[in-house]
Amino acid sequence: MHRIRGPFNVSLSGQAAAAAAARDTAFTATLRDHNAKWREWLRASLASNAIRVPPSQGNFVLALFPTPEIARAAFTSLRDKGLLVREMHSYGISNGLRISIGLEPDMRGVVEVLKDFGALGAQD
C-alpha cells in the first residue's frame, strides 16, 4: 500500500479538520491580515544592501545574503536564539533563508538577530 499511496496524503480526520478550518472564514481573514502586516514589516525591516528580500505574497519571506557563508552564519545565530528558519541550499539558493511569518515577538527577534548581518533593524 505504501508504494502506491499519493505523496503527502492526509488521513480522514485530517481532512475533516482541514475542511472545518476552511469554513472558519473569520479566522482565515484574521490570519491573512496578520501575515500581510508582519510579512511587510519583516521585509522592510530586513531589506538593506546586505540582505535582499524579494516581494512575497506567501506566509514567508526569502532573505538573500551576499554569500552562502553569511547565510549559514545567520541561520546558526537564529537557531542559537531558538528562532528556526529554513536554509534554502537544497533549492539551489545557497545564500538564502526562508523565514515564516510568526508571532510579533518572534518577528522582532529575527530582526534583532539579523541586524548584525546587515539589516537596518526593526521598523516601527
Image (tube, rainbow, N blue to C red):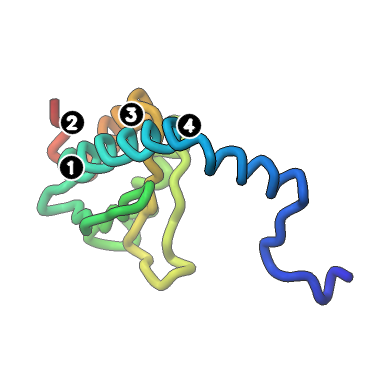
Which is more foreground, mark 1 or mark 2?
Answer: 2
Q: Which residue is mark 2?
A: 122
Q: Is residue 52 left or right of residue 72?
A: left
Residue type beneath disc 1: Ala
Q: Is residue 60 left or right of residue 39?
A: right
Q: Tell me how far mark 1 sits from mark 2, CA to CA.
A: 9 Å
Q: Which residue is mark 4?
A: 82
Residue type beneath disc 2: Ala
> Percent x, y for residue 120?
13, 38
Residue type beneath disc 3: Gly
> Percent x, y for residue 84?
47, 40
- Disc 1, disc 2: CB below 8 Å? no
Per the rendering, the mark at residue 62 is none
Q: Is residue 92 left or right of residue 65?
A: right
Q: Is residue 10 above or below residue 14?
A: below
Q: Quadrant of the N terminus?
A: bottom right
Q: Quadrant of residue 28?
A: top left
- In the image, farthest residue toward the right: 1
Q: Which residue is mark 3?
A: 109
Residue type beneath disc 4: Gly
N-terminal-most mark, 1 or 4: 4
Name the residue located 39 percent from the left edge and 35 percent from the top edge.
31
Dot 4 alpha-carbon crowd within 10 angstroms: few under 14, some 14 to 19, many 20 or more:
few
N-terminal-most mark, 2 or 3: 3
SS category of the residue bearing label 1: loop
For the residue pair 93 and 20, the one nearer the viewer reads as: 20
Name the residue located 45 percent from the left edge and 37 percent from the top edge.
25
SS category of the residue bearing label 3: helix
Q: Tell me how far mark 2 sits from mark 4, CA to CA.
A: 19 Å
For the residue pair 24 and 63, the one nearer the viewer reads as: 24
Q: Tell me how far mark 4 sits from mark 3, CA to CA.
A: 10 Å
